[in-house]
Amino acid sequence: MQSRTLLNHTPVRDCFSQDYAEARARFVAAARRAGAQLEHHVQVDLAGAQGETLSTDVALIGAAEATSLLILSSGVHGVEGFCGSGCQVALLRDDALLALARQRRVALLLIHAVNPFGFSHLRRTNEHNVDLNRNFIDFARPTRNPAYAGLHDLMLPAQWPPSADNAQAIASYIAMHGEAAFHEAVTTGQSEFADGLFYSGTAPSWSNEMLRAVLRAHGAGRRRIAWIDVHTGLGRCGHGEKIHAGLPGTFDNLRLARSIWGADVVAAWAGDSASRQVVGHAVGAVFGECPQAESVGIALEYGTRKTSILDMLRPDQWLHRYPGTASAEQQAAIKRELRNAFYVDDDEWRGMVSGQCRTALLQACLALGH
């Protein structure tokens, strides 16, 4: 298949990368070409899967005094960063879209690899097994999820693949409590099992503190802020579901999001999304860190292959809970399947996701600009 191209004739596939190190190099090069102001937030005590430096790189394009700011972020869930990074590089190479942002006096803030450890090591979580979209909470009131306690050992048994008895026990739980209650118990978030699924942590992560500092530095003085946070794994393959990233129950903010991105913006807190409502998502930080601004955001959630994401997360979490148990071959197979669950290495898919992201960016520029 011939690679699709951007408006400036750059092949779309050249915006996407095969690993974190390549993605970081492409992002930094594209940001420099675009004349962006670059900053590097390095995790000095950690190394990547290839021994590379781990960094969240931030690119700002536009006047510091611009009253409107459009944020595009990637890699909150590390292994999902392949898609978001590609969309960010595509934006940085899109001369027409950059010109429109300048014309509309909208500053662009690109935050690349919010979770660089997870991106590099092919984990959804960070270096401490924290799910960053469960970590932006008030830690005086940690996420209590007693229903997860009864499922922890069932979801992550000592043996992998799980036994028939394990599968039957989970099926019995679902039969008793219902599919929705099962998924709510597992995925909402929990603070009591540090080696468990969807762990919120008990303190702000490095990425949490870094992201808040970036928002304070670049969001101060802005009157309007729109944020697009790229995710993958849920929904129809190649389709980007626009999920409201405001605070739950904020109908006025949901209406604002729909006025920018269309009536098909859905709200997980209203039960009309492929995603379940979570407690402590990263985009919610903008409301506390930039209180002077009218802020609105969406998670742009791209479907990948038709598979159960939970079924993909369980074996990787098993590797984390029982280190040294799996053979090298089993570890490699689990990591390969996890990457494939969150990134479709196909030109048609890359064209679909980058095109939809471009549309969302255009809509935001037009809504924010003068």
Image (tube, grey):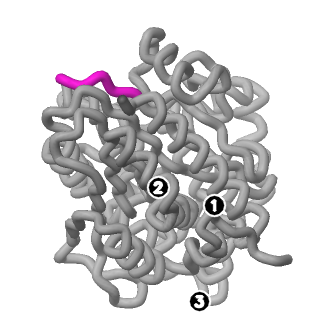
Q: Residues within 10 Å of mark 1 (few under 14, many from 20)?
A: many
Left/right of residue 103 with respect to residue 17 in the rendered view = left
First in sequence, mark 2 or 3: give its number: 2
Above or below — where is 172 with respect to 64?
A: above
Above or below — where is 1 with respect to 353?
A: below
Q: Closer to the camera: disc 1 or disc 3?
A: 1
Instruction: Give the spatial CA distance, label 2 vs label 3.
Output: 24 Å
Q: 44 or 253, which is in the foreground?
A: 253
Q: Which mark is residue 328?
A: 3
Q: Is residue 295 magenta?
A: yes
Q: Whole-percent x and y of residue 314?
A: 61, 58
Q: Which mark is residue 262?
A: none
**At 22% from the left edge and 57% from the top edge, which residue is drawn?**
206
Badge 2 is on which residue? 77
Q: Quadrant of the N terminus?
A: bottom right
**Circle 3 sits in a helix, a strand or a loop, which is it?**
helix
Please state which amino acid type lies under the numbered disc 3.
Ala
